[in-house]
Image (tube, rainbow, N blue to C red):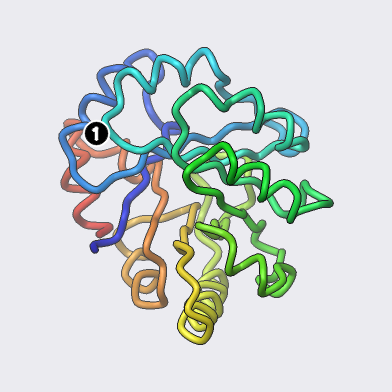
Amino acid sequence: MSVIISPSLLSVNFLELKTEIERLNQIDNLWLHLDIMDAHFVPNLTFGEPVLNKVKTVSKHKLDAHFMVTDPDFFADNFKDVGLHNFTFHWEAVTHHDRLISKLKSIYPSVGISLNPSTPVSVIPHYLLKKIDLILLMSVNPGFGGQKFIPEITDKVKELAQFKKDHGAHFQIQVDGGINDQIAPSLIQAGANNLVAGSYIFSAPQNDYLSRINKIR
């Protein structure tokens, strides 16, 4: 299976949200990446359930939500009816990770853990790596689009890929932040199989998103 590309709606023209999503509907093997922020875990505040209830009626792609929030347990309950495929929470925001993962797995088809750039992969116990569906490595500091990629994240991708090989784990390795056609090849070679891109895709001339997505892939 080819690498999944997850265009981040954080970078779309929100005045043309429906049109933007319909353009993406014409492209295969995408997830739609949704950055949910609470103005506490990160400074910004983004969209909530009312917007996502509309998005799910338009998008043909799986909805991939990245919760940059201080209380993902609360959001797990409040977002259960908006059609999410994947629910990713930040390791740094949670104390009882195992309990939250069990709860999320009872609600959502896919559950992910996100790590800030400075958080090492080693903080996640091996038994949880075997239970999880996705690991999201932030390659910029969370909260704002358009930042530059932190190159040391590639080593974290390699570490996770080696764990998958050694232990027969099946989680996806997703990378988010500063992704473009120059950076993507080394991440894919290192073992990433799900890449989030916002600014690079949605800044395409004449809205040629397919060309930008193919360059990343």
Task: Give the residue number, with chain letter if any, for mark 1.
Answer: 24
Quadrant of the snapshot with the N terminus: bottom left
Answer above or below: position of 29 versus 164.
above
In the visual, does 55 lie left or right of 164? left
Answer above or below: position of 156 versus 59.
below
Q: Residue at x 27, y 57 (%)?
A: 216
Q: Residue at x 67, y 49 (%)?
A: 102
Residue 177 at what x, y percent from top left?
50, 52
Q: Residue at x 57, y 56 (%)?
A: 138
Residue 80 at what x, y percent from top left?
56, 27
Seen from the viewer's position, the closer of residues 183 and 88 is 88
In the visual, does 59 lie left or right of 99? left
- Outermost residue toward the right in this view: 95
In the visual, does 78 lie left or right of 198? right
Residue 108 at what x, y percent from top left?
52, 39
Quadrant of the snapshot with the C terminus: bottom left
